[in-house]
């Protein structure tokens, strides 16, 4: 999967705004966020489709997403963290986590290119 952008991020070939990592997963800020704090959580082993993952990998990914969602909720002081998994734009399983304050905020049409400096500072804030 050498052409997969997420595999390249995992391999360190492409930089990202990392907020969390363990042996099996990586979480980083989306470069085209829907809202401030929009984070992607991915497995380090390439998988194309969430429901094709074995049970252990699937549960582990969702556990990692929950851990990151708890941190995002603390940092952004929001009532909810929205979660979406669709996987058409990048053929590598990824969980979108988006801090939400109300209805209608988990809309991909709201995505805008993020500012590199702001994303760097935001990633640091989430990591701390």
Image: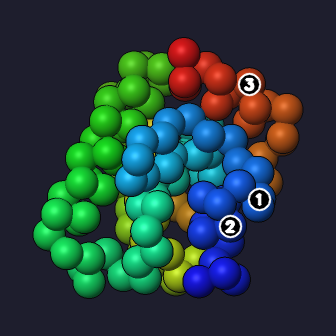
Q: Dot 3: what SS?
A: helix
In this figure, which residue is indicated by the disc labeled 2?
Answer: 8
Going by the picture, which residue comes out furthest to the top? Answer: 128
Q: Position of residue 22 (x, y in %)?
A: 42, 42
Q: Helix, strand or loop at disc 1?
A: loop
Cα separation between marks 2 and 1: 6 Å
Q: How is the image coloured?
A: rainbow
Q: Assess whether mark 3 and mark 1 are in contact (beta carbons under 8 angstroms).
A: no
- The answer to whether marks 2 and 1 mark residues whose Cβ atoms lie closer than 8 Å is yes
Q: Residue at x 48, y 20 (%)?
A: 75
Q: Is residue 96 visible?
A: no
Q: Residue at x 23, y 65 (%)?
A: 58
Crowdedness of circle 3 by 10 Å Cα count: few (<14), some, many (20+)? few
Locate residue 52 relative to residue 108 in the image: left or right: left
Q: Percent x, y for residue 69?
A: 36, 37
Position above or below: 15 against 90: above
- How packed mark 2 is, by other alpha carbons closer than 10 Å (few <14, some 14-19, many 20 or more), is some
Residue behind mark 3: 121
Q: Work out whether residue 24 can be spotted.
A: yes
Q: Residue 113, which numbered label?
A: none
Count of labels shown? 3
Front tag of 1 and 3? 1
Q: Callout 1: 10 Å neighbours few (<14), some, many (20+)?
A: few
Quadrant assignment, res 124:
top right
The answer to whether residue 27 is left or right of residue 63 is: right
Q: Residue at x 68, y 41 (%)?
A: 17
Q: CA distance from mark 3 to mark 2?
A: 23 Å
How far from the left and from the top, in percent, is residue 48? Answer: 43, 82
* 124 versus 93 height, above or below: above
Q: Quadrant of the N terminus?
A: bottom right
Q: Which residue is mark 1?
A: 14
């Amino acid at each position: 999967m050498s052409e997969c952008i997420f595999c390249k991020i995992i391999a360190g070939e492409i930089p990202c705004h990392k907020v969390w990592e363990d042996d099996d997963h990586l979480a980083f800020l989306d470069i085209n966020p829907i809202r401030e704090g929009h984070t992607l959580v991915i497995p380090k082993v390439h998988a194309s489709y969430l429901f094709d993952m074995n049970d252990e990998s699937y549960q582990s990914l969702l556990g990692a997403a929950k851990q990151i969602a708890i941190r995002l909720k603390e940092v952004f002081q929001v009532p909810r963290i929205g979660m979406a998994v669709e996987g058409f734009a990048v053929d590598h399983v990824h969980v979108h986590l988006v801090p939400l304050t109300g209805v209608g905020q988990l809309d991909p049409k709201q995505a805008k290119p993020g500012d590199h400096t702001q994303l760097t500072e935001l990633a640091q804030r989430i990591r701390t």
